[in-house]
Image (cartoon, rainbow, N blue to C red):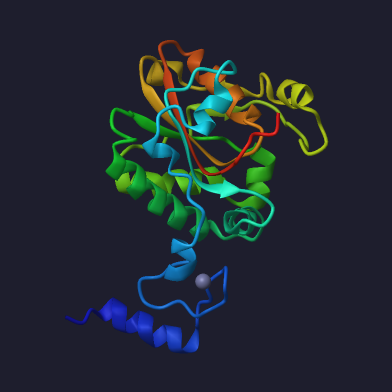
Amino acid sequence: MFHIKDIADDFLSLFLPRPCLSCGIHLVRGEEVLCTACLLDMARTDYHLRRGNMLEQAFWGRCLLERAAAFSVYNRGSRIRKLIHLLKYSGRKDIGIMLGGLYGSVLAESGFTTGIDMIVPVPLDPARERRRGYNQSRCIAEGIASHCGLPVRSDILLRTGRSGSQTSRGRYERWENVEGLFAVGRPGDIAGSHVLLVDDVITTGSTVEACVTALQSAGGVRVSVAALAAAQKLTV
Ligand SMILES: [Zn+2]
């Protein structure tokens, strides 16, 4: 059975070949962003399958999370690191939507999203979002939502100040740096709910920690977190 869209895609790809962002090979019909080989080759954590996984353990004693999961491992040479860089700095929203969609289908299939009421992306500093034109965590959240039928709420968690660069600070300073940075805009909408917080990458955990603290100030809020990537060991 031929579909007009498939024929049009094939026709266009003759003249506008789309390269795999990892290996450069031309993508074929049905492939987005990465070729199938590169997609299958990504280092997945499978944290969503294990309660008490390493990422959840990293938050023990820091904040109360229901579940925590990340799609891939974030380290110096990892494929996901390059993709997140393109997503954040090269206008490639499609990377967030595609990988979010892929992760959303994995999470929904495993039951990870069962019982969750809404998806809340980590907000970006408003000035930065204006410059970038979008919030990458929201793109990921939209991708995830497309596979589990949950609403994405960007009006719940608000950024109330600027964090500045976190790169050369110690953990305590980093934590201090984000503490009080987030506030809940509509506490009545989330009181008593289970929220899935979505971030692009978790490296120190301090942003997640500050977001969870803010969300839970609404009362009776349970929070799970899902990110596209997480460092194998949070830099504490
Ligand atoms: Zn490839």
Check the picture and name the quadrant holding the C terminus.
Answer: top right
| Quarter of the figure with residue 199 | top right
Give the number of marks. 0
Residue at x-position 37% and y-position 23%:
194
| Residue at 16% in and 80% down | 1
User: Residue 10 appears at what percent x and percent y?
Assistant: 37, 84
Q: Relative to residue 149, is residue 183 drawn left or right? A: right
The location of residue 150, given as percent across then percent down, is: 32, 38
Question: Would you say residue 144 is visible in this rendering?
Answer: yes
Residue 211 in view of the camera: no
Indicate the position of residue 188 as horizontal and vertical percent values: 40, 16
Name the residue: 65% across, 38% down.
Answer: 203
Which residue is at the far top?
219
Taking the view exactly as shown, the residue that stands out farthest to the left is 1
Point out residue 36 in the picture as x, y percentages from the top left corner: 42, 69
The vertical placement of 118 against 193, above or below, is below
Residue toward you, 118 or 52: 52
Position of residue 36 in the picture relative to residue 87 (left or right): left
Closer to the camera in the image, 129 or 56: 56
Taking the image as shown, residue 148 lies to the left or right of residue 59, namely left
Q: Is residue 127 above or below residue 9?
A: above
Q: Nearer the viewer, residue 18 or 172?
A: 172
